[in-house]
Image (cartoon, coloured by chain):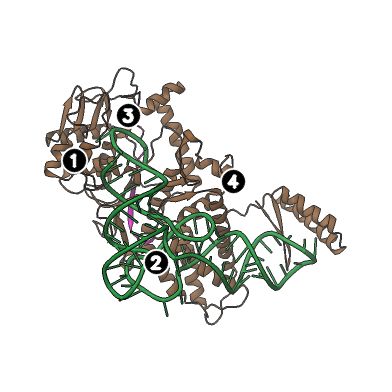
Chain colours: A brown, B green
Amino acid sequence: MELYKENQLKIYNSLSKSKELFVPVTEGRVGMYVCGPTVYSNVHLGNIRTFMSFDMVFRYLLHLGYKVRYVRNITDAGHLENDADEGEDRIAKKARLEEIEPMEVVQRYTVDFHNVTTKYNFLPPSIEPTATGHIVEQIEMIKEIMEKGMAYEVNGSVYFDVLKYNESSNYGILSGRTIEDAIHNTRVLDGQSDKKNPQDFALWKKADERHIMRWPSPWSDGFPGWHLECSVMSSKYLGEQIDIHGGGMDLKFPHHECEIAQSHTCSGVQPVNYWMHANMLLLNSQKMAKSTGNYILPEEILTGDNSILPKAFSAGVVRFFNMQAHYRSILDFSGDALLASEKGYNKLMEALKMLKSVEASKTTNDFDVLAWKQKCYDAMNDDFNTPVLIANLFEAVKFINLLKDKKAQISEEDLAVLRTTLDAFVFDVLGLVEEETQQGSNKLEGVVEMLIQMRKEARENKDWALSDQIRDELASLGIQLKDGREGTTFSVN
RNA sequence: GACAAGGUGGCUGAAAGGUUAAGGCAGCGGACUGCAACUCCGCUUUUUAUGAGUUCGAAUCUCAUCCUUGUCUCCA
């Protein structure tokens, strides 16, 4: 029997602001859409937290036995800029500055994004559609919205008529904003005089002569509005009603609100059953911003090539750090926090290795494996509560250490359950990876073994100076010697 | 200004009305060690931003104040 049949998964729905029992449209199948990155620069660390959260969601759904179609788009058509370059596409702007083709920028940063997701052990989505690959469908959707009378054309651009939509539907259903609020609190921007109302948003923008990225349409040579691609691609690949739609908290308004308006206009139904929003990531208790230098790239964490963190951290540690917080909480990223996570992560991994060599006894004492397993599922079923899951995992760690010291026993049956459950949660669900025991090449190993032997002899002669010299100099090369009862081992950092 | 999410120990971060407020890190003590490091065991800390209210009972509900973060038309 599939695990989902015996697990009551609850998901916090941003739409209802409450936890709801998860019931997919089609039994056993889940359609999930997550707003992907804009590939006009390196992927932001905050994006990584969001995508990592949904990677975990994806993984848990798979673990429960659902057949999941996970769609995460690539925004490569670019966005309008809001400042002096009104009407200019971000990607086009970047391209001009760097004197390369727009699609060259897109290609470069798409590759960068995929490199990062691979290094951080993300499962690839089922479909990763691009906005530029769906211009035709976007034009078709604009036509449909116009036919329904919810959009109008001005000077080659098409805008969504928010006020009209709000007469029969609820614009603000997700964000809690009302049209009245919007009217009173909208900045007046230059160059948007084409709109009937400042709340209206663009479905199609006519490109000016400087704009490089452009496509023909019934209205003008131009480009689609930003919100449109997600409506188009989610309905194309997942249908009119999708189970889960995710994204960062900052996309709730206007992006997701506009998506609802567009899709609802076309289909007449609520397009998304469960809206999930991942919270923001702070860096040293401050928001991340390139301008202030409070900024770090996902890549720089791994290499240690940055001025924010004391050292390099592995992707596994970063993942563990992220999973120690709930996805709906603001998380504060810092060197201290990562150092703490690294220790905890190593402790967990060490215990897992230990478990491999544990031998079963006739009975289990001091640990109820089945009850513990249930607690792990309960945590995940409660809106993907990974921090509580991890707290539970450490209960098992403690028990494993007792087993290692022969202070506790475990039956064969329980041992099998413990192993499969830990493997499932640690590797399949949390997506943590066993650090490669990078003992280096055989040659390095031989050299280090030789030094260990020399040190052993020195120690036997009570030549502490030589013994410590070998230890310290190896340590400064990143090779740590570990003296144990059964001799000395080493690890490469 | 409006809307949204928050403010929990030295740090990080769970718990969302009910006996002792998870877990990780740090700290302290111990085992191991030539001394350390690594590893393991044990222990310690918070009364939950502030003030008031509701309740038999509140971190959890209400109100006010202060503070943080996000959004406000195209940045996850």
Looking at the rendered structure, the secondary structure element under dot 4 is loop
Classed neighbour count for the residue bearing mark 3: other residues with Cα under 10 Å, few (<14), some (14–19), many (≥20): some
Residue placed under numbered mark 2 in the picture: A377
- A115 relative to B62, above or below: above
Point out the image quarter for the N terminus of chain A: bottom left
Residue placed under numbered mark 4 in the picture: A312
The answer to which of marks 1 and 4 sits earlier in the sequence is 1
The answer to which of marks 2 and 4 sits earlier in the sequence is 4
- A10 relative to A227, above or below: below
Q: Write down the region rendered in magenta.
A: A63-87
Q: CA distance from mark 2 to mark 4?
A: 33 Å
Q: CA distance from mark 1 to mark 4?
A: 49 Å
Measuring from the top left, give residue A255's x and y in whole percent: 29, 40
Classed neighbour count for the residue bearing mark 2: other residues with Cα under 10 Å, few (<14), some (14–19), many (≥20): some
Do marks 3 and 2 both belong to one polypeptide chain? yes
Residue placed under numbered mark 1 in the picture: A180
Tally of numbered tags: 4
The quadrant in which residue A167 appears is top left
Q: CA distance from mark 3 to mark 2?
A: 44 Å
Q: Is residue A86 magenta?
A: yes
The amino acid on which the numbered mark 3 sits, given as a three-letter code, is: Leu
The amino acid on which the numbered mark 4 sits, given as a three-letter code, is: Ala
The quadrant in which residue A304 appears is top right
Q: Is residue A8 magenta?
A: no
- CB under 8 Å between discs 1 and 2: no
Residue placed under numbered mark 3 in the picture: A80
- CB under 8 Å between discs 1 and 4: no
